[in-house]
Image (tube, rainbow, N blue to C red):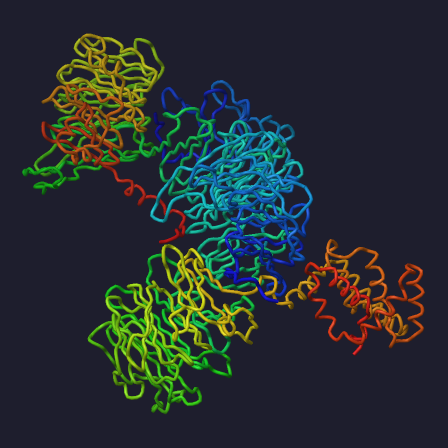
Amino acid sequence: TVAAGVTVARCSPGGGAAGSRLPSPPRYLLCASGDFVKMYSVGTEETLRVMGGHGDLVTGIQLNPHNHMQLYSSSLDGTIKLWDFMDGIPIKTFAVGAKLLALYALASSEDSVFVVIPKSGERDTFQLVSVKLTKAAGQDLEAKELSVVLDGVDVSPKHTAFGREGEYVASVKEVNLQVYFFKQKQLNRFSVSAIKTKSGNNHFTCIACHPTEDCIATGHADGKIRLWRNFYHKKEYTFSTLHWHHDTVKDLAFSVEGDSLLSGGVESVLVLWHNESDCQKDFLPRLGSAIEYISMSSDGTLCCTLHTDNRITIINSNLRFSKSIQGLIKSTDIKTGLVVDPRTKALVLNGEPGHLQFYCLQSDQQLFSLDIVQRQYIHQAGLNQSDLVKVAFSSQGKWLATVEEREEVTDPELQLKLWFYDEETQSFKLNTRINTPHEDHITDLCFRDVDETEDDSLILVTAGRDCVFKVWVMVEDTDPEAQQSVSWSCDFVGSYHNYQATNCCFSEDGSLLAVSFEETVTVWDSITWELKCTFCHPPGKIRNICFGRLTCSKYLIGATDYGFLCCWNLLSCALEWSAHLNILVLQPDPLSEHIAAVSWLSKESSLFVFKPNEPRPIYIQRNLCKEKIQLAAFVPRDEPETIASEKYLWLRRSQLFFLTDTQELMTLSTKSLEERLTPSSKQLAVEESLPVTPFSLLLGKHRRQQSQEDIDLGKLALHNKHERDSPAVKELLHTPAHVLPSASFLCPIFINSLLISKENESAEEVADEVEMESEKTEGDSDEERDVTEMEQEDTSPVELLGEMTCKLSKSQEKELRKIRKMDYSWISAF
Amino acid sequence: QVIPGHEARSVEALCWAAGDRLFGAGLGGDITEYDLARLCAARSVEGCGGPIWSMAANGGGTQLAIGCEDGSVKLFQVVPGGIQFERNLDRRKGRILCLSWHPSGTHIAAGSIDVLRVFDVCSGQTAQRIMVNYHVHKVKRECIVWSIAFLSDGTVVTSDSFGRVQFWDWERGTLLESHTVSTSAVLSLAVSEKEDSIVVGTSSGATYQFQLLPVKMGSLEKRWVRTKPFQHHTHDVRAVAHSSTALISGGLDAQLVIRPLMEKVQRKGYDAVLRKFTFPHRRLVSCARKARLLLFQFSQHLELWRLGSTEQTGKDGEVLPLCRMPEHLLQLKSKGPEHIYCSCVSPCGSWVSYSTASRFHLYQVRYEGDGISIRKVPKVPKMLLPAYQLQFAADSSSLFVASAQGSVHVLQLLELGGCKHLHTFRSPSGSPEAVYLLASSADGHWLAAVGGDWAIHVYDLKCLKHHCTVPTYSCAVTALAIHPVTNNLVIAYSDQQLFEFSIPEKQYTAWSRTVQNCGLHKAWLERDSPITHITFNPKNPSHILLHDIYMFCVLDKSLPLPDNSALLMNQSTLKQLPETARQRQLHAFKICKKFQPLLFADLLDENCLVMVERPIMDIKTQLPLPVQQKKFGT
């Protein structure tokens, strides 16, 4: 199938702003992530389902308190969607009309939910309103019946909480706490006196309400937790203080019974407070990074914390670390750029401070994190610490070069490290460490490797702000005590008129090196290190350069900060063409001639894809996104995609990813969301959905016993096995009721599936057939015939089954019905 | 007012009984009743059970129970004119550290080591015995129940050395709730009258409030919740009290703190401000102006110092080099276990006098070059003791001794080293209260005396008769002085009001009336420490010099009074203002807060002022070490 157009899809993985929810029993973790709601398996940490449909950021998700298999989600696009998350299908969409910033659902309010919306006519003021969800039929509904509950609430969903049995709602903003009692229609306001100390102020940062008592816990920016009681008295209210955090309390959560309180903050320590006492507390330290959200499962057995580095940690109720789901780590500043590891095709970029993360795009998981700096990171503001700034891979991924620097005003501390991929340990091993490779910051580095088999051709070039570029080569290690045979050393230092070197890159065949020195691009012969020629396009300084590839390898492309994109012909040493574009990112596709350029003009990013041999771009996507795109990378596809449209042919072999300055990873895709999901994950969902209850355990035991008994009674055992294995039965039992065809269709299918096919003993077949006949007599012969028909032509029925969850056309349905009718148990018999 | 202490009688427990009678019991093993009018121990009764650790009066104030070292609880009947032993309750081993009566008076809860017991008062038997240590496993340390309270619903609240506050159902002997408040011991506990709030004091200096709060709105189920922590002390909080609007705590760091409960205070004002008292509101230093001597009164001894001097002059803020160092002349140890109650040095410096609860001493000091000799004046006339205040006349010719029942004795001092009793002024109103403040005029004509009923009597020393009485005000007098030139009596009251009373005219002066009409500045009235001393500048009669613990103030009567909008600023901040702004800020109160805490300030001569500062750190270093606590970030 061919998609109608390319959609820009945000694929920032992991947790979004809205936090996460653990349904009961806690087998799945639901998490708002960008425009999607993701469902993870608690048992395997895998992404089971991605529910898309919102047009903007999902701001809140809440389990339907009246149906634990349903989920409400709200989004900035102004809609509330009700999902059946077991099947990943939207049941209803309620259009509210205003931007929804937070969502709350209460068990006590039958037909309404609460959302935070901007107050109309006023900037930066928000109100909490209750939205009546109409019960009318149909998928898309209007929900315009709003009633204001609280005025002047804060945007953050952590700043509002509903109390015991929905009796009251409490909301905090700055130094004020307001509590509204629904029954009494009474609004109480309290405030803490604003104190500004060296370590910060005492503004409210989060709020949680006790599940069974009238107690509100609030977190403050100075690390204190206050427990408010008696707040229905305007004057005689009281609070006690718990203080352990030294910095802002980011989130709070009460246990289900309310006897303990969890708190987390930038210390990346989860604190468990018992009995609201200052003296009894437990800690779960070293959680990796600052805790943003804490969520408890509704049965209290698990809790999960969401971290600033885009990770979800699942924690047992006894405060033991259980599992973690790691998405793309959001680093504060991606200095390394987007690099693709040639070996794993993973996206490589800054991860945790001082670490390099390898992020697998297909599985939306972190493959591993490589500690480059190898120093303890201290969480403290204003401390200059070494960080990774540049990364380059050799073409086969055998060598990795990293540059780390410590920001010092006068004398930056620089280190160049070269890592060798060790096949045995399947990881990178440090080979050479070069202290102060340049006098000043390194601006760019690249490898030259034409043929990986010979290490001689491997050259590393670094360009520095100290006006030189250096060429590093491998040399045989003369030291007999050294553990490794080769090490790296400097071979050549080049400079040009004492200009700062800003970019460097090799041509595809490795014969030429282009180094840009401010306004000038110099081209060097990589064997003799002679300066071949120079190009410049005054008055702009060169921002990016790259060589053309394959058929276009005679061209050199450069972008200047004066807003020009130039293409120089290396043979004629002349400007081939130039275009007036403010190019931020210039990214060549390693597998084709295409070069992607992202421009930034009048507050929007646009994408241009062109071939260097023709000045006309082959693809333009204006208004790609509102954010500034900082980085881009082509990730080679495992197998070329079949794209019919001429326009998107450039996407055939590689996929283009962007990173915006808000750290959102985006991609261009020709497919709709459902198609991008791997069918395997759906299959997993089905397996997972069998709940482990005491009853099922008992039943399982019973069954096991039974099967042992059945060894004697061979035919019954066969029957049991057959029943369990039949995909038709499985399909029938796990397909949601509302997408199933009518019962009259199903009954023969079901019964048919219970039949033992003809290959088996005939005696049983007869017995079953009699049974079937007694239930349903009509159409028996038809089905019999159908089965024989199908047996000849159908080869892979399972594959076809995978597709059937979508809406089916009449003909498809008919076809499917035929398939269902037939018996596959013979497949499993082999 | 202060009841002077006694070395051998440390007070472990105090209680009010039978109306306004104050009883104290201590490790001396005696129960002492105090005479509040005469400010001394009235009578004492031997407890017969070794040191007494605790004492409590029942709800009606008719019975006293004491807990003794030997583990006995004894009941005493409060009878007019004393107490009478009634009976012993069931005695077990282990000292009784705390006691509490059930409000109905039928039961007594007693806390001991590792155990708390409830006694039936009628039968005298132990009704319940609860091991407080039972719930802590594998603990070898003993658990001391430091404080106990018996609530009317039958709940017993204990605080113990493990830092716990526990609530027990005494009939079933079960633990209802346990709150671990601190890692160090919880030493004291007090319950509010409505029994909905408890305050506890810990040995780390923190006090905590517990409140009985409904678990849910409108429901009857209530629970004790630890609410507010207060850290006002550095050392053990040995005693706490719970008034209807405030929490009062006192500790080893010699501070008394009154923390108002904001929700109980109706309006902003005096009650709504945290009060902290470190020093007694009394004058502990006296100054011999002419001889440039200072006499410091300690609890058991006196020290006489000669002030240093300088010949240089300098600008503001400079520290001038001394040409003569201050000199410690004399240390006078008081005999016996009693504490010194008051002391004074004569303006000429040749007489020093002090008084304890039972003795009065007068010494003559002679200076012979660098040497010094001291001689006790023999045959001091027998007077009604103790003396509450001593004051020498300006010419050192006579000594005024403030005494009980509103009387003031006048002793004439003879050059040769003798003295004789000249006259006794009796209070015309016949008040039973003692005189606690005296002021004599520079010309030796007038003497003003303030009694415990806050009435100020002015006596004529020439005629030796009562001259007049200053109209009584509803507050205690904290300081008074007679102006050397105009003979106006300046009076400072504990509510920070200032009055000026003309003795010759027997009425308030015009200035005093304007002050009353305009009202004093709000910031002045909201200060929390009283004026302890008043003196005058003889060169500029319109200047009055006042001080309390935190500030020194020159009151210039010739300048206009500040209104509430004006800032009552410290002189050092005022100095930073430009000249024009300073002119605008010009008003009668010139305040200097440079010296804190200020114990004494007096004008020696026209351009020399003596200030006595007692840094709190000095006191703290003499205290036992506080509980070590790790503070984050240090």
Is A294 situated left or right of A693 in this image? left
Q: Horizontal and vertical percent for residue A148?
A: 54, 35
Q: Depth check: give the residue in front, B280 or A180.
A: A180
Q: Depth check: give the residue in front, B291 or A785.
A: A785
Give the residue displayed 47% in from the left and 44% down from the top: A155
Kindly tell me whether residue A419 is visible in this rendering: no
Give the residue displayed 32% in from the left and 32% down from the top: B339
Quadrant containing the C terminus of chain A in the rendered view? bottom right
Is A762 situated left or right of B619 in this image? right
Q: Horizontal and vertical percent for residue A59?
A: 52, 50
Residue A622 position (above or below residue B109): below
Kindly tell me whether residue A410 is visible in this rendering: yes
Q: Depth check: give the residue in front, B308 or A218.
A: A218
Residue A235 position (above or below residue A556): above
Q: Splitting the image into 4 quarters, where does residue A186 fall?
A: top right
Residue A736 position (above or below residue A398): above
Q: Depth check: give the residue in front, B235 or B437.
A: B235
Q: Horizontal and vertical percent for residue A761?
A: 90, 76
Quadrant containing the N terminus of chain A in the rendered view? bottom right
Q: Splitting the image into 4 quarters, where does residue B42 fall?
A: top left
Is A174 situated left or right of A706 in this image? left
Give the residue displayed 25% in from the left and 36% down from the top: B596
Q: Number of numbered discs present?
A: 0
Q: Horizontal and vertical percent for residue A525?
A: 30, 85
